[in-house]
Image (cartoon, rainbow, N blue to C red):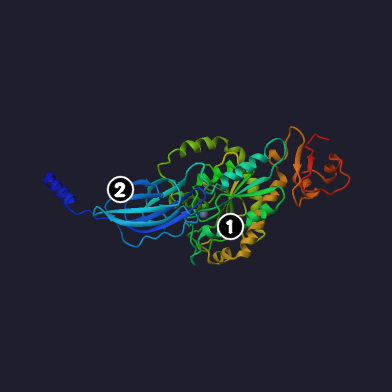
Amino acid sequence: MRGVLAAAWLMLVFVAPVQAAEVSDVRVWGGPEHTRVVFDISEPLDHSVFSLKDPHRLVIDLRNARAVSRLSPGRDEQGRLSGLRSGVRDGTDLRLVLDLDRELKPSTFLLPPSGPHGHRLVVDLQDKAGSSGGKREARRAVRSAERSNGTRSRDLVIAIDAGHGGEDPGAIGHHGTHEKEVVLAIARKLARLVDAEPGMRALLTRDGDYYVSLRQRAAIARDNHADLFISLHADAFKNPRARGSSVYVLSQGGASDEAARWLANRENAADRVGGVDLRDKDDQLASVLLDLSQTATMDASFALGEKVVGELASLGPVHRRQVQQAPFAVLKSPDLPSILVETAFISNPDEERRLKDPRHQQALARALLRGIKGYFHERLPEHGLMASGPVEHVIQRGETLSHIASRYQTSVTRLRDFNQLSSDRVRAGEVLRIPVSGDG
Ligand SMILES: [Zn+2]
């Protein structure tokens, strides 16, 4: 009897017309390395992809699917995608044709529902190696490598990481403010302040509305020889009265308190929302290797965190006065002091309003800069104070002898004597020898 029922049921499945998957919307996010096109689909579907030349196009055939609205992506900031057309193919399939402005390497993958999104088909259009498309990070890397040659001191590189972006809005306030937008605004303000400091240079891990995976953010910082990594967020908590900023360093295990656990879960889910190819499976090995050398950096991260939380406290209430620990994936760089700053709770309506205010953003950026400078005042990385012999410092515009003395934790008198200077006046481009402990 059971066998008969099962057979009848199977037949029903096979004869019932298969519902076509629906494609309801499309978004485009242009980043420096690739442009991402995301289609909202009603369910996972089969698809095939091929490229055409003259002109460059990418054709995607979706099996048993139909478009239920006009698919018009927004503008691709990077200009890789110039148009999108769709049409019915073989009666039941949907053909998408993406017009490209150059030859690009496509990759496609499906994403399951997550955050504000349902099922998605992601199409990444990657620049070919050696092409001219947005290689800002690479250029910066070369510059900083040149500067780090020899014994000359180089600029301290501050990696500023605006959380979320593109497909991942981060937390959304009651009035519709997106975390990804306010943290980018604060990150850019902080970058301007850092760049105005003699001997410091800012590196933005993202400088636009596109998603960068958590691992890629740390990789950009390391490839550019960053000295510090500061990830900026403004998250939501289930309790709308929660308020104030907090500063986190990595923990290997649990989180310091309930809010920390909640936030770490949310931030680590960003890759799922923003869209990371799930075929990328070497995370585990990478994290084992990273953990080995992590401990040495924790001390420095705590020191930086303490300076920053102290400065944030001068702006208003902080959520926790101590540096908190939580297992944030973005902080897992073995050799790079890293903190994550929750600048405010966007879920608190008062804080949401302040986060949107450019003056408050600027005040936050200034407080962060004071924290960074306070940290360097106490610990200079090795390339700024080498043990093997005198360091040479090329004077930058705007620098004074006392700037330089405080940066290298020495005195103006000692600098003057060491370089046999007759006055305190220095000129941009001149090279100063910096005494290290034991010298002169
Ligand atoms: Zn966040």
Image quadrant holding the C terminus, namely top right
Type of amino acid at the residue the image marks with label 1: Thr
For numbered disc 2, what is the local secondary structure? Answer: loop
Q: Is residue 431 left or right of residue 211?
A: right
Furthest toward the front, the residue is 54
- The foreground one among 270 and 154 is 154
How far across and down, in percent of the image, does residue 198 sit? 72, 50
Tell me where residue 77 appears, x and y as whole percent.
50, 56
- Say which residue label 2 marks: 46
Residue 190: percent from the left, percent from the top? 63, 55
Side of 431 relative to 82 (left or right): right
Any part of residue 327 in sight: no
Q: Report the front residue among 150 and 44.
A: 150
Q: Are marks 2 and 1 in contact (CB under 8 Å)?
A: no
- In the displayed structure, 143 sits above or below 189; it is above
Query: Considering only vertical position in the picture, is 137 above or below 209?
Result: above
Q: Position of residue 63 (x, y in %)?
A: 28, 50
Amino acid identity at mark 2: Asp
* Rendered residue at 33%/62% (across/down): 69
Q: Nearer the viewer, residue 416 or 5?
A: 416
Query: What is the CA distance from the residue labelled 2 to the residue labelled 1?
Result: 42 Å
* Disc 1 element: loop
Disc 1: residue Cβ within 8 A of ligand 1's nearest atom = no
Residue occupying the point 61% across, 45% down: 140
